[in-house]
């Protein structure tokens, strides 16, 4: 290799190390770009239906989004606050009932295995007595309190850092949404002049792919909300609208969101009848399987041609690299990388190299 090639390789490796050290900043920048693309998609749809200045369309979209979020919060938060208050009041009695059921089941199992005469009775009293003997003394209690306070301070610090990161993402998305062309031109100007026209086309394809992904997410979330509403109505669960809306909203978060959405309807059902909570769990397991293996793969394959195996791999890899935010942005990252690999690596690098190798 020539000196210039070694220099280019060293520069590429240095750029890789720099990007790796700044991966948290880059993932937040990408989150801002995704939100900006969502705003730009809404603005484009509004202007296609009714011609108006872009600033006016952006203002209308922002006001509409604030109203929708406020209405969703008003629908979801107050009913669940009341239900959780009632649940907390009934937790002691529910815990006693569960304790009695557990003791009865274990005693019956012990009687079936060892026989009625050989079963050791009073084991629950012994367990309770051992638990009392294992209570911490004053020194260990003070140490536990100190560790708890340190944990609370760490949690407060993490919440403050998360709030700052959220404000940064929102600010970036608004600034990019106001002047998307200017930011795109700045990014293109950093590339060599012979590749700028091609890069403009690739960025346009990335934007179209992200818009298609957003439409697919909306369709998938709507299907999940509809299935949840129908199932909860058939089971006679309270707060059907709030639970269905919450299931559709949390469906945006892969894997974790559907699990979190199960907690609220199960809590509401537990206040009515324990068997309804189990039925709600079964209902959400069925909905999650339908969403994971039927709805989302079909919608995403139709919208962005993203294979289910690549989707699962992207979620695992980006979660390991970027953390929880990487899991949330795994699908849009996979969509953008799919376009970049297809256009840059395959079309611009591998296809010309293959033609040169096959040329006589």
Image: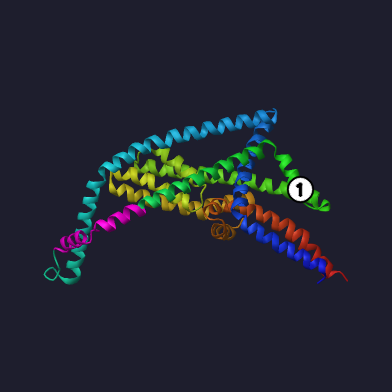
Asked if residue 82 is positioned above or below residue 317 in the image, the reply reads above
Secondary structure predominantly adopted by residues drawn in magenta: helix
Q: Is residue 88 above or below residue 340?
A: above
In magenta segment, residue 293: no
Q: Residue at x 72, y 62 (%)?
A: 12
In this view of the protein, can residue 200 be seen by the observer? no
**Closer to the camera in the image, 93 or 324:** 324
Q: Quadrant of residue 126?
A: bottom left
Q: Quadrant of residue 119?
A: bottom left
> x, y percentage for residue 80?
37, 39
- Residue 309 appears at what percent x and percent y? 57, 61
The answer to whether residue 323 is left or right of residue 110 is right
Please identify the quadrant where the N terminus is shown. bottom right
Pick the front one: 115 or 246: 246
- 268 sits left or right of 102 in the view: right
Badge 1 local density, few (<14 within 10 Å), some, or many (20+)? some
**Magenta-highlighted residues:** 122-147
The secondary structure type at the circle numbered 1 is helix
Between residue 221 and residue 64, name the one nearer to us: 64
Residue sitting at x 19%, y 59%: 132
Asked whether 128 falls inside the magenta stretch, the response is: yes
Residue 245, percent across and down?
A: 46, 40
- Which residue appears farthest toward the right when viewing the image? 360
Q: Position of residue 358 (x, y in %)?
A: 83, 70
Residue carrying label 1: 188
Q: Residue at x 29, y 49 (%)?
A: 275
The quarter of the rendered structure image containing the C terminus is bottom right
């Amino acid at each position: 290799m020539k000196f210039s090639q070694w220099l280019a390789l060293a520069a590429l490796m240095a750029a890789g190390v720099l990007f790796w050290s700044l991966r948290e900043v880059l993932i937040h920048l990408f989150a801002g770009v995704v939100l900006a693309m969502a705003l730009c998609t809404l603005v484009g749809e509004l202007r296609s239906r009714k011609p108006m200045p872009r600033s006016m369309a952006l203002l209308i979209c922002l006001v509409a989004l604030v109203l929708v979020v406020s209405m969703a919060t008003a629908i979801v938060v107050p009913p669940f606050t009341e239900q959780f208050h009632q649940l907390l009041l009934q937790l002691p009695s529910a815990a006693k009932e569960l304790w009695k059921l557990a003791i009865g089941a274990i005693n019956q199992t012990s009687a079936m295995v060892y026989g009625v005469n050989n079963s050791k009775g009073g084991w629950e009293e012994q367990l309770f007595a051992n638990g009392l003997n294992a209570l911490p003394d004053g020194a260990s209690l003070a140490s536990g309190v100190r560790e708890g306070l340190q944990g609370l301070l760490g949690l407060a610090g993490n919440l403050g850092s998360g709030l700052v990161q959220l404000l940064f993402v929102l600010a970036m998305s608004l600034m990019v949404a106001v002047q998307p062309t200017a930011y795109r031109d700045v990014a293109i100007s950093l590339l060599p002049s012979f590749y700028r026209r091609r890069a403009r086309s690739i960025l346009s394809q990335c934007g179209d792919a992200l818009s298609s992904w957003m439409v697919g997410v909306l369709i998938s979330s709507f299907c999940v909300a509809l299935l949840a509403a129908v199932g909860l109505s058939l089971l006679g669960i309270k707060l059907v609208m709030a639970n269905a809306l919450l299931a559709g909203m949390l469906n945006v978060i892969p894997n974790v969101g559907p699990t979190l959405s199960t907690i609220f309807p199960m809590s509401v059902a537990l206040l009515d009848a324990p068997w309804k909570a189990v039925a709600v769990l079964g209902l959400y397991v069925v909905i999650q399987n339908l969403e994971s293996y039927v709805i989302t793969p079909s919608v995403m394959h139709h919208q962005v041609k993203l294979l289910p195996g690549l989707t699962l791999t992207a979620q695992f890899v980006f979660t390991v690299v970027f953390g929880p935010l990487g899991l949330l942005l795994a699908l849009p990252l996979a969509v953008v990388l799919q376009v970049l690999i297809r256009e840059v690596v395959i079309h611009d690098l591998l296809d010309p190299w293959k033609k040169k190798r096959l040329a006589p």
